[in-house]
Amino acid sequence: EPYRVCRRPLFLRECPDEKSKIHP
């Protein structure tokens, strides 16, 4: 399951794929 959670407090907008993957 691809995690689309930004590490920064910006869950309102979809973060880019570069910063979308959180550390496993």
Image (spheres, grey):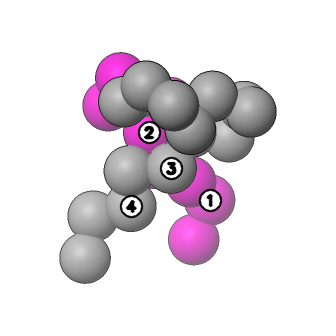
Q: Mark 3 points at which residue?
A: 5
SS assignment at label 3: loop
Asked if the residue at tag 3 contacts the one at tag 2, i.e. Cβ–Cβ closer than 8 Å, the answer is yes
Amino acid at circle 3: Val
The answer to which of marks 1 and 3 sits earlier in the sequence is 3
Q: Name the residue under label 2.
A: 20
Asked if the residue at tag 4 contacts the one at tag 3, i.e. Cβ–Cβ closer than 8 Å, the answer is yes
Amino acid at circle 1: His
Amino acid at circle 4: Tyr
Direction from residue 4 to residue 11 in the image, left or right: right
Q: Mark 1 points at which residue?
A: 23
Query: Residue visible at 63% across and 28% down?
Result: 10
Residue 5 picture location, percent across and down: 50, 50
Amino acid at circle 2: Ser
Asked if the residue at tag 2 contacts the one at tag 4, i.e. Cβ–Cβ closer than 8 Å, the answer is yes
Q: Quadrant of residue 16?
A: top left
Asked if the residue at tag 3 contacts the one at tag 1, i.e. Cβ–Cβ closer than 8 Å, the answer is no
* Looking at the image, residue 24 lies above or below residue 15: below
Q: Give the range drawn in magenta.
A: 16-24
